[in-house]
Image (cartoon, helix red, strand yellow):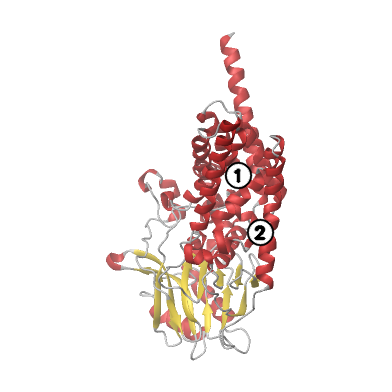
């Protein structure tokens, strides 16, 4: 009789964890591009179960399951990259998606495990949970090189006004507000109606602040000649490195770049737009740039580059009409399992996507400069997702340029989520940002995150945009995540007071 009872208990626990997984998956529908904001309330389901947990391990498993659901439903598209060049690897894709979800959910599980030990009153424990959970979201930005994708605070990108608070507290501060908003049902069920009302209204207060900020903003631009042309060639990833099609791809870039009567002085191509080494294809590169520009024009293009000791670099170069290279930027923050493979000898099946040779990170952050445009901070691909780490404090640029290639991820939520990350960096830093994708969503943002124009996912075309003026450094640009940590200390103080208040009352 003991074994059947134990088996039934184990089955029941797995069923409960499965429901928490579903709750997390449903809650992720609040993220871009769907922005079904009420879905975030589903996180109150595992939270109420967490309050009744009998041990730290049980609390950890509850939010480990919820986190797995959240990330499995919202980062599934990463596994699509395996099939782009090696369709035979389709059988591996579910396991890759699940593995990534497990890794990211680990931060949720640890936050629940640690916070469970704090707080004697349920309401105090909720505040402790928010503090440690938010710290976990912050930790995702740098632990194991970092992958702060689909932060809970991303839901505030639903409206430009609500996103303006990022200029003060950043993306991680928005995570704090988003989590309190998610827990409104939990506060209500526990009988703390005032807290429920407060955290339901708080996002509206932030939106009102944002609306006022936008209403008082100007639409300042650089001198009229400071136009930029963004080129999205929409070359399929499966064809991108086919040498027999290289000339055809370059011809497409040239045709798009020369479209119309007037070509702006600055033309920007996407990440690895030139799929070959400049040192080995100098005449081809020079001819291509000369055909794509006017006499005083320059192109910024992504290109792989050989460094010292024949190391492989993912780079961006500025090259003028005569073929002279004016500036070089090497990507500093590489994508694990995308540009280099940790534990390569144990994971040979991933070599078709990563390639046989690892890229190495650039060592210096060098701003590009162009007369009439000022200084430009290059950000290659996912370098744009790291809040507070996109520009150097000692050399503030006039503009950020993000070149990327989202063709790996097909017609999925991934390119839209990447676009929102770029928009949030523009708001945080108070700087215009030009985003150029091979295929994905090419777009420009002003210093308030207002979209200036975009080219749709999977479409080829050009976008000519005026360069907006940079703002004076925002509070976030000045102080980084200090606003976020101030919120964390406030939450911890509130949680401690709630427990102390109970002790005094007793």
Residue most extreme to the bottom: 295
Q: Which residue is mark 1?
A: 70
Residue 137 in the image, given as x and y percentages of width and height:
52, 48
On the question of residue 242 being in view, the answer is no
Q: Position of residue 475 (x, y in %)?
A: 53, 65
Say if 369 sits above or below 145 in the image.
below
Q: Quadrant of the N terminus?
A: top right
- Within-10-Å neighbours for mark 2: few <14, some 14–19, many 20+: many
Residue 300 x/y as whole percent: 48, 77
Residue behind mark 2: 206
Residue 96 or 431: which is nearer the viewer? 431
Question: How busy is the neighbourhood of tag 1: few (under 14 within 10 Å), some, or many (20 plus)?
Answer: many
Sequence-earlier tag: 1 or 2: 1
Q: State which mark lies toward you, 1 or 2.
A: 2
Report which quarter residue 211 is drawn in. Answer: bottom right
Tell me: 501 left or right of 356. Answer: right
Relative vertical location of residue 339 with respect to residue 315 in this rendering, above or below: above
The residue positioned 70% from the left and 43% from the top of the image is: 194
Label 1 to label 2, Cα distance in Å? Answer: 25 Å
| Residue at 69% from the left image edge and 58% from the top image edge | 205
Nearest the eye: 239 or 41: 41
Above or below, 488 relative to 320: above
**Would you say residue 239 is visible in this rendering?**
yes
Looking at the image, the residue that sits furthest to the top is 1
Residue 459, image x and y in percent? 64, 69
Q: Which residue ends up furthest to the left in the rendered image?
A: 309
């Amino acid at each position: 009789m003991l074994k059947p009872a134990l088996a039934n208990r184990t089955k029941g626990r797995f069923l409960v964890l499965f429901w928490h997984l579903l709750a997390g998956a449903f809650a992720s529908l609040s993220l871009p591009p769907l922005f079904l904001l009420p879905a975030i309330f589903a996180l109150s389901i595992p939270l109420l179960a967490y309050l009744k947990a009998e041990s730290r391990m049980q609390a950890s498993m509850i939010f480990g399951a919820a986190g797995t659901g959240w990330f499995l439903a919202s980062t599934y598209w990463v596994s699509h990259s395996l099939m782009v060049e090696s369709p035979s690897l389709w059988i591996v894709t579910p396991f890759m998606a699940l593995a990534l979800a497990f890794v990211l959910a680990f931060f949720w599980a640890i936050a629940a495990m640690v916070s469970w030990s704090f707080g004697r009153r349920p309401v105090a424990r909720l505040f402790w949970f928010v503090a440690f959970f938010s710290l976990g979201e912050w930790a995702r930005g740098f632990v194991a090189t970092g992958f702060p994708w689909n932060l809970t605070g991303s839901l505030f990108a639903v409206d430009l006004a609500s996103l303006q608070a990022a200029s003060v507290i950043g993306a991680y501060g928005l995570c704090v507000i988003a989590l309190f908003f998610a827990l409104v049902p939990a506060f209500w069920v526990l009988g703390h109606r005032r807290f429920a009302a407060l955290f339901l209204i708080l996002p509206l207060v932030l939106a009102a602040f944002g609306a006022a900020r936008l209403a008082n903003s100007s639409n300042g631009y650089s001198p009229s000649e400071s136009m930029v042309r963004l080129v999205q060639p929409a070359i399929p990833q499966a064809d991108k490195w086919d040498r027999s099609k290289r000339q055809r791809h370059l011809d497409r870039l040239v045709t798009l770049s020369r479209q119309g009567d007037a070509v702006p002085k600055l033309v920007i191509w996407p990440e690895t737009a030139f799929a070959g080494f400049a040192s080995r294809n100098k005449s081809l590169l020079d001819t291509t740039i000369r055909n794509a520009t006017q006499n005083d024009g320059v192109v910024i293009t992504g290109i792989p580059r050989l460094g010292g000791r024949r190391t492989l670099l993912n780079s961006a170069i500025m090259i003028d009409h005569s073929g002279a290279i004016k500036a070089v930027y090497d990507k500093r923050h590489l994508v694990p399992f995308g540009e280099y493979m940790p534990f390569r000898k144990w994971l040979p099946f991933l070599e078709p996507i990563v390639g046989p040779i690892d890229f190495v990170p650039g060592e210096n952050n060098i701003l590009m400069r162009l007369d009439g445009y000022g200084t430009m901070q290059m950000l290659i691909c996912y370098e744009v997702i790291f809040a507070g780490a996109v520009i150097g404090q000692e050399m503030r640029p006039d503009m950020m340029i993000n070149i990327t290639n989202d063709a790996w991820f097909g017609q999925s939520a991934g390119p839209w989520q990447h676009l929102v990350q770029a928009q949030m960096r523009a708001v945080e830093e108070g700087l215009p940002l030009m985003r150029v994708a091979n295929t994905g969503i090419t777009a420009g943002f002003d210093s308030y995150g207002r979209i200036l124009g975009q080219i749709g996912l999977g479409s080829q075309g050009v976008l000519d945009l005026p360069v907006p003026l940079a703002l004076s450094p925002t509070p976030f640009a000045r102080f980084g995540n200090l606003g976020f940590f101030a919120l964390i200390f406030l939450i911890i103080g509130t949680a401690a007071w709630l427990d102390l208040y109970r002790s005094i009352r007793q």
